[in-house]
Image (spheres, rainbow, N blue to C red):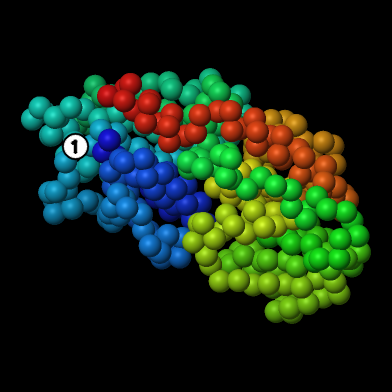
Amino acid sequence: MRWDIFCRVIDNHGDLGVCWRLAADLAGRGDRVRLWVDDPSALAWMAPDGAPGVELRPWTTPLGAAALASVDMPDALVEAFGCDIAPEFIAHCARLADAGARKPAWLNLEYLTAEPYAARCHGLPSPVQHGPAAGWTKWFFYPGFTADTGGLLREPGIGSADDETTEHSGDAAPDDPSPQQVTLFCYEPPALSDLLARLAEGPGPARLRALPGRPVAAVNRILSSADRRGALMIERPAPRPQAGFDDWLRRSDLNFVRGEDSLVRALWAGRPFVWQIYPQDGGVHAAKLDAFLDWLDAPADLRRFHHVWNGLRPGPLPPWDLPAWGAVVRTARVRALQVPDLATQLRRFAIEKQ
């Protein structure tokens, strides 16, 4: 199949991370993908080697005739997260259709949520009323955690016999002398000072990997540029490609993740994790967080930890129980693996709607 995927980088590169994973996954299955991005700069570290079958195209405003001259009709159009495909591109496709080319499937890839509306709205049509593509239909495609949604991004190999799912030292006995490995990928959580103090005070050594950007900046505002405080050692690594980020999560005893892409990767890593959801005006993100915790079947202590970490409940962070939390994540991972992955479902859906 031939795909055109459109992505606008809003902030924090999460949209681009999801779109790149999707493009690379589709291309890895033999498809041809053009990925149109308005700011591809983060791909220099996120995917420095590119991916066979993925062609990166600059999404300029407007898209000039030269940019469209070599564009043939795709089998599927994907506008990621309601970004609204460039109108010049839609007009170009309409001209190709008028000349006899088959209309593409036009898919609106929505944000990931565990809320019930994802299943209700998944696969619904949105007729195009105006413009050069009037009379066409866009289709809503909702990622999700259950069989009545579009599933999660999951490249082939995850969940296979060769996939590493063995228990890590995060499930080891409390007297394990090796440092506890913690990966921090966050915004600016209100309870960060509490977390750093807890790690610094023991009872055993801890190594915190503060990832580049907002996580390390948030840590530096509390600890300056110190490399050690009490039992806590701080690492400030350089950015790594997506595969390296995934490896960090697999090798950690506890992962703090944020947004959409790293939440899914933490689930596949099978390690205990805490999610900082993207904050929204009016606190509407609280319902989204609770819907995920419901799906996760999170115990009371893990649920409270999430609420405090996200600033939805006052008070100190509660104690953590990594062996129990790890068991919860691995059980949820097994459930998620039963749902067909997003790329498989998206391809099937696009073929059906062409």
User: Does the rendering let one see residue 263?
Assistant: no
Residue farthest to the left, as pictured = 99
Label 1: few (<14), some or many (≥20) within 10 Å?
many
Q: Identify which residue is drawn at 32% across, 22% down.
A: 353
Percent position of residue 305, x then y: 80, 46
Residue 160 x %, y %: 56, 39
In this view, 322 is above or below 341 = below
Quadrant containing the N terminus is: top left
Q: Please name the residue shown 88% across and 51% down the image.
A: 319
Residue with the mark numbered 1: 73
Q: Quadrant of residue 333?
A: top right
Q: Is residue 164 left or right of residue 297?
A: left
Q: Quadrant of residue 220?
A: bottom right
| Residue 63 image offset from top left, x and y in percent | 22, 51
Determine whether, in the image, residue 124 is placed left or right of residue 145: left
* Residue beneath the point at 13% across and 34% down: 96
Callout 1 secondary element:
loop
Percent position of residue 308, x then y: 79, 48
Q: Nearer the viewer, residue 10 or 79?
A: 79
Task: Judge by depth and name the residue closer to the eye, 329 or 103.
Answer: 329
